[in-house]
Amino acid sequence: MERFNEYQWPASNIIEEFDNLLIRLEREHGLHFKDPRHDVARRFLNEIVEFEAMEEEQRSSLKPWEKVPENPI
């Protein structure tokens, strides 16, 4: 698999699914996370070999329409 960043598929899909998992854990176990769930999911992405984190300046230079994840289908 090619490397991907947080605005590409499958990262956008992983963040959404991970966020849903964290919501379920919060509800079922009464947990509260220190950081916003999106940040927790982003840190999880950093553990994936194929994930390539973007520098802050790269993220801020993207136009809003470029931040929309690609649809692989």
Image (cartoon, rainbow, N blue to C red):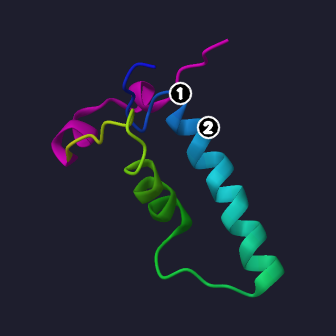
Where does label 2 land, which residue? 13
> x, y percentage for residue 5?
37, 33
In the rendered image, the vertical position of residue 53 relative to residue 18, given as above or below: above
Query: Where is 70 relative to 28, above or below?
Result: above
Tell me: residue 24, above or below residue 20.
Answer: below
Q: Residues within 10 Å of mark 2 (few under 14, many from 20)?
A: some
What kind of element bears circle 1? loop
Q: In this orientation, which residue lies closer to the viewer: 65 or 28? A: 28
Q: Are marks 2 and 1 in contact (CB under 8 Å)?
A: yes
User: Which residue appears farthest toward the top when viewing the image?
Assistant: 73
Q: Residue furthest right?
A: 28
Residue 16 lies left or right of residue 61; in this view the side is: right
Q: Is residue 71 magenta?
A: yes
Q: Which residues are magenta?
A: 56-73
Amino acid type at circle 1 is Trp
Q: Residue shown at 25%/42% (left/top)? A: 60
Residue type at mark 2? Answer: Asn
In the rendered structure, the answer to whether residue 50 lies left or right of residue 15 reads left
Q: Mark 2 to mark 1: distance in Å? A: 6 Å
Residue 23 x, y percent position in the rendering: 72, 68
* Frontmost residue, 23 versus 64: 23
Looking at this rendering, what residue extends furthest in the left direction?
57
Element type where label 2 sits in the image: helix
Residue drawn where x is 52% and y is 28% of the image: 69
Q: Residues within 10 Å of mark 1 (few under 14, many from 20)?
A: some
Q: Is residue 66 shown in magenta?
A: yes
Residue at 40% from the left image edge and 51% from the top image edge: 47
Q: Which mark is residue 9?
A: 1
- Viewer-side residue, 60 vs 38: 38
Q: Position of residue 9 (x, y in %)?
A: 53, 27
